[in-house]
Amino acid sequence: MENIFCLVVILSVTEKDIRDAFGERWKDFEDCVQYMTGRNNRMDYLITANRKDYKDVFLPVLTPAEWLGLEK
């Protein structure tokens, strides 16, 4: 895990993230909170094994395998 912490940013969830997610009415609230937290912090992309749950979003969504394949 220490190696991963050198490569990623771990964000805190804010009240704004929760309120933004609640306003979106996604089927999976937790996925929406993750997405809103990344979007509100202007992240480059979101990494998840559940890529199919993030349709019609502006923040690029990558699987762990896709992320590992990126040039760092």
Image (cartoon, rainbow, N blue to C red):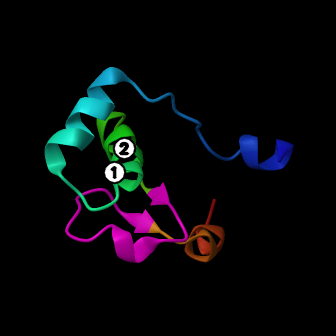
Question: Which residue ends up furthest to the right in the rendered image?
Answer: 2
Badge number at residue 13: none
Residue 58's quadrant in the figure? Answer: bottom left
Label 1 vs label 2, nearer the camera: 1
The front one of 11 and 67 is 11
Badge number at residue 29: 1
At horizontal 15% and vertical 41% (from top left) the residue drawn is 23
Residue wearing tag 2: 33
Find numbered disc 1 in the image and state the secondary structure of the residue it sits on: helix
Residue span colored magenta = 46-61
Which x, y percent locates residue 64? 61, 69
Which is the main secondary structure of the residues drawn in magenta? loop
Given the image, on which type of amino acid does mark 1 rest? Phe
Which x, y percent locates residue 60? 35, 63
Q: Does the residue at mark 1 contact the one at mark 2 (Cβ under 8 Å)?
A: yes
Residue 57's quadrant in the figure? Answer: bottom left
Question: Tag count in the figure?
Answer: 2
- Within 10 Å of disc 2 (Cα), the crowding (few <14, some 14-19, many 20+) is many
